[in-house]
Image: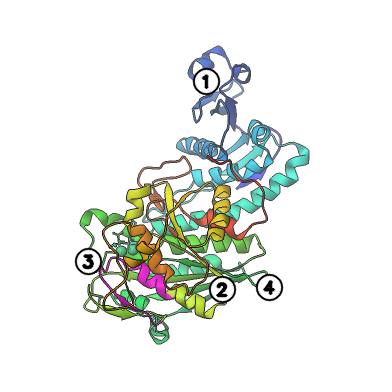
Amino acid sequence: MIRIGCGNSENYKVNFYFKDESDLKELSVNIREIFGGEYLQSVFLAKENGTMSLLMGLGTEITDRLQIKELSAKAVKQLKLYKIKSFSMDIEKIISAYGIDCIRDITEGLMLGCYEQIKFPEHKWEEFEITLTGIIEKETEAAEFLLNETIPVIEGVRFARDMVNLPGNRLRPAEFAKEIKIFLNHTGVQVELFDFAKIKEMGMGGLAAVGESSEYPPCFLILRYLADPNNKEITALVGKGVTCDTGGYCLKPAASMLGIKGDMAGGAAVTGAIYALARNKVKTNVIGLIPICENRISPGSLLPGDVITSYSGKTIEVINTDAEGRLILADTIAYAAANEKVTRVLDIATLTGAVVNMLGFSVAGVVTDSQEFFEEFRSAYKRSGERYWRLPVYPEHEKMIKSKIADIKNVGEKYCGTITAGLFIKAFANGLPWLHIDIAGTAWVDSPIFEYQSQGATGAGVTSIYYLCNTNRSGDRKEK
Ligand code: BES
Ligand code: ZN
Ligand code: ZN
């Protein structure tokens, strides 16, 4: 629980210091020998009256609000090390340097810094009690507003992390669908579920073919949040929901297998974002569509060389059974374009290893044919602080996925795999403005890059999608 407070009654306090003589002068010479206010430096200090302070360094200046998020996360992580669960944090210096809007970054950092992944057999999540002090009276209302808006957004991120962190045997397709339903309970989001029989009956040939590979059947979720009836714009948010991707008959090598439980990060991100939009009653129209299945080996599994017929009627030559994500996304996007009156499509997926080779673990790839859509997404990710990079698309890339025996094939040539994967999906968008996000590199970190991450799932995409659909805000982050 985070609250805006006043007073200084807490036994444990966090105090920030700039790396600046005049700011540090209240500290004793002894302390200044070990604490100079370096960015992210932290030192515990016991006071004579029995209280404890955690001194946190701000560095010479705050140039990017992401730093505030990191600082808050680091503070909570330090306190957690000593099992301190209740403390106050004096944010006066941060607010004077960066304005009241940074309550958002502070809240994000605090809520993500204390995140813990589910541990088996039992998970005891202990919430923190944090009081933010140093806010002047006339800004408390604004601070409350920002705090209350940010909490559901980060709950969405934490949900996405939880889902990705869950082992494959604890999150079969039906269980993933159930978790999503439960999470969206009482939010006003309407949830519809198609079972395997319905998927086959509808002619979703890609999802049926991949889903056939497992004894745990596939399903398909539609999440409708239509809160702006006078606006005809409806954004489809499509998220890959492969709860376990072994590669199928094109089996992944053992060393690549550990991350396969996280192949539903796109679906989890879509859910997290829609949850936050609904909880904050944002005036917008979105429809989430999540194809959910496993990609495994069974007598009925897809084989390389097979030709399947997708929902759109287009035939697909399956070159590689490990390129399963695009097969299920193709059906989903075609379904959205044909049945849901959507006016643009965003899809998010852990789609290619190629994006990891290209951009690493902190930058996700974007493929789109719409400059306008990209500009909107760009201003959204500037707000969230996530990093993205748009890749080029040209007709020669499209040629790479032409098939001799079907309308299209699911793998291109050896190179530019992220671009061809994106273009494969585009072929099913029926001409709607479309934007594809490949989070194969950013959905998971083995060693955290930023303080607000912990080993495992990151919750990639939730905040950027939220801000894309909620444009009534100020406060873009500075361009780097
Ligand atoms: N889910 C994987 C992509 C992936 C790779 C996610 C690494 C997370 C980390 C996807 O289904 C896949 O296997 N893609 C193949 C495509 C290839 C066969 C054309 C890949 O990138 O190797
Ligand atoms: Zn795969
Ligand atoms: Zn996959």
Disc 1 element = loop
Q: Up-down: is 143 above or below 341?
A: above
Residue 229 has which mark? 4
Residue under numbered circle 3: 250
Residue 109 placement: quadrant: top right
Residue 353 placement: quadrant: bottom left
| Image location of residue 41, percent across then percent down | 49, 27
Q: Up-down: is 157 above or below 23?
A: below
Lower sequence index among marks 4 and 3:
4
Highlighted range, magenta: 313-331
Disc 3 element = loop
Tell me if the residue at label 1 has its CB under 8 Å from ligand 1.
Answer: no
**Dots 4, 2 in contact, CB < 8 A:** no
Residue under numbered circle 2: 342
Type of colouring: rainbow
Lower sequence index among marks 4 and 1:
1
Residue under numbered circle 1: 36
Lower sequence index among marks 2 and 3:
3
Lower sequence index among marks 1 and 2:
1
Observer-side mark, 1 or 2, equals: 2
| Image location of residue 442, percent across then percent down | 41, 51
Lower sequence index among marks 4 and 2:
4
Q: Is residue 230 magenta?
A: no
**Residue kind at label 1, given as amino acid type:** Gly
**Residue kind at label 4, given as amino acid type:** Pro
Observer-side mark, 3 or 1, equals: 3
Disc 2 element = loop
Ligand 2 picture quarter = bottom left
Lower sequence index among marks 3 and 1:
1
